[in-house]
Image (cartoon, rainbow, N blue to C red):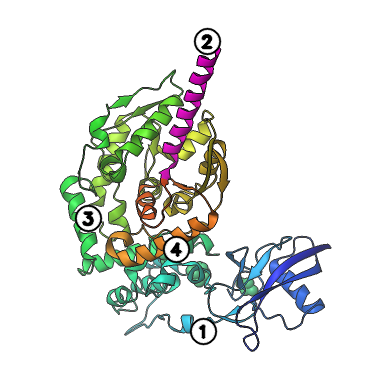
Amino acid sequence: MKTLTFTVARFDPATDDSPHFEKYTVEVNEGARILHALHAVRDAIDPTLAYRYCCGSGQCGSCAVRVDGEPVLACMEEATEGMVVEALNLPVERDLMVEMESYLSGMEGLVPVGETRLLTRAENDAIRPLRDCIECLACVSGCPALQVAEFSGPTAMRQEMRIALDPRDPRDRVERTVADGLFTCTTCQRCVQVCPKEIKIPGKAIEKLRELANRKGLTLPKHKEVALLVQRTGRSVERIKPTFMEQVPDVIEPVGEVKGEVAFFVGCMYNSRLPETALDMIEVMRRNGYRIHIPKDQVCCGSPLIRTGQTWFLDELKHTNIRVFEKTGCDVVLTMCAGCGSTLKNDYVTPFTVKDVNEVLTEGGFEAPEKLPVRVTYHDPCHLYRGQDVHDPPREILRSLVEEFVEMPARCCGAGGGVRSGLPEEAAELGRQRGEAIEETGAEMVVTSCPFCEFHIAEHTDKPVINITTLLREGYAEKDEGSEEEKAGEK
Ligand code: SF4
Ligand code: SF4
Ligand code: FES
């Protein structure tokens, strides 16, 4: 047995306007789950503590709560000293119980029409990734789109696609899902991160429903424009100034000896809108001993097409990119755009390894810069953090680079999934919330590692928004200046 002290958000609708926190100390077995800790409070301290549970084994979905802000199943997650247990971010009925009925009753059910039959193996295989939902609503509670837009939410979309794939239910799901906010999803992957059944709702349901919507001519006008631009130019962004690739040779040598060799997948935004940032990254890589190949006939990775359901010429883009990068002979393809990196890693099958610049620098070891006297926070790009599972590397770089690094909760800024172009008001609201979160950190500057986030967040904060490699280059410049001054002092 062990003693455990933790905090629970209590709420009684008869007496409270909002939840308040109570601390409890209980005796539990080693390895006890959160549910056991709640039982201990109820049995030994306060029998009125309200929470739901049924199966106790991760099957019924009734026990979902937030622990230290993260949605989890109370019966599956180990109880930890000092944890804070709260209700899901949904209307609270009492203590840890939320109102689920109105959401769940609004979800469509399968309605077979005519002769029913068993599904074929192929039909079953297609539906399987969407079938395992236990209706815990963890995804609904964490979805940023649902909080700012008219959206039926992730698991309702999952259910719509599940029905769309079932030939026994011939109803057309597309118009309903468009009306229910199909295009409001930013593809932030938060729902995947919190789902105890690891259901990949954006990729397996939302993007697929958007493909069905595209076939019915329901793609948003702004998204259609982007697809036509990619089809016409191979790029998702218009050229408005000399591009990155116009400014660099095919191969760039490192400053000293060659310690590694990579091929750089530039991405449309860094190529056409932010070439200066890509040049900063190149200088950082050169300084750390990398030879960099830049194949000039690379094209858009296709991310804007996949996210918006316009995949009819995606294979051409994929074939072109794989062919031109294979020709470089490099084992590693380097990305610095979170969206491109996530697409190459998750939507392609490549004969090479794809790595984000933060991964390459931290795995290979990078030269320590001069620490800059500034307080910064870091915005996790969804497609880097959740899309590529890259969380620690940028933090490792920042801790070596700035005097003070303050964390900020990871949350979508609203730029992804075609929302910034297609539904700018929703994107602006999420951006505004990100601006507030930045303000709360007291940071003088926000660092990130994605061109879309850089552009979007800059519109919603008065703090400078800077790419991590640009700041690292500044750290190296400070270091060089310091050594110059030292040398001058010695003379
Ligand atoms: S990907 Fe993000 S915005 Fe889309 S449904 Fe999931 S949580 Fe919501
Ligand atoms: S999709 Fe996952 S997180 Fe959402 S309700 Fe179903 S099981 Fe829970
Ligand atoms: S009690 Fe059933 S999932 Fe936790």
Residue 219 x, y percent position in the rendering: 24, 66
Tell which of 246 and 172 is nearer to you.
Answer: 246
Per the model, the C-alpha gap separating discs 4 and 3 is 27 Å
Label pair 2/4, CB-CB below 8 angstroms: no
- Residue that label 3 marks: 226
Residue type, label 4: Gln
Above or below, 50 relative to 302: below
481 falls in the magenta region: yes
The reply to whether the magenta stretch includes residue 371 is no
Residue 179 on image: x %, y %: 30, 76
Label 1: how many residues lie within 10 Å, few (<14), some (14-19) or many (20+)? Answer: few
Q: Secondary structure at mark 3?
A: helix
Question: Residue 101 bears which disc, if any?
Answer: 1
Separation (CA) of disc 3 from disc 1: 40 Å
Where is residue 214? Give x, y as percent.
Answer: 24, 65
Q: CA distance from mark 4 to mark 1?
A: 29 Å
- Circle 4 sits on which residue? 433
The mark lying in front, picked from 4 and 1, is 4
Q: Earlier in the sequence, mark 3 or mark 1?
A: 1
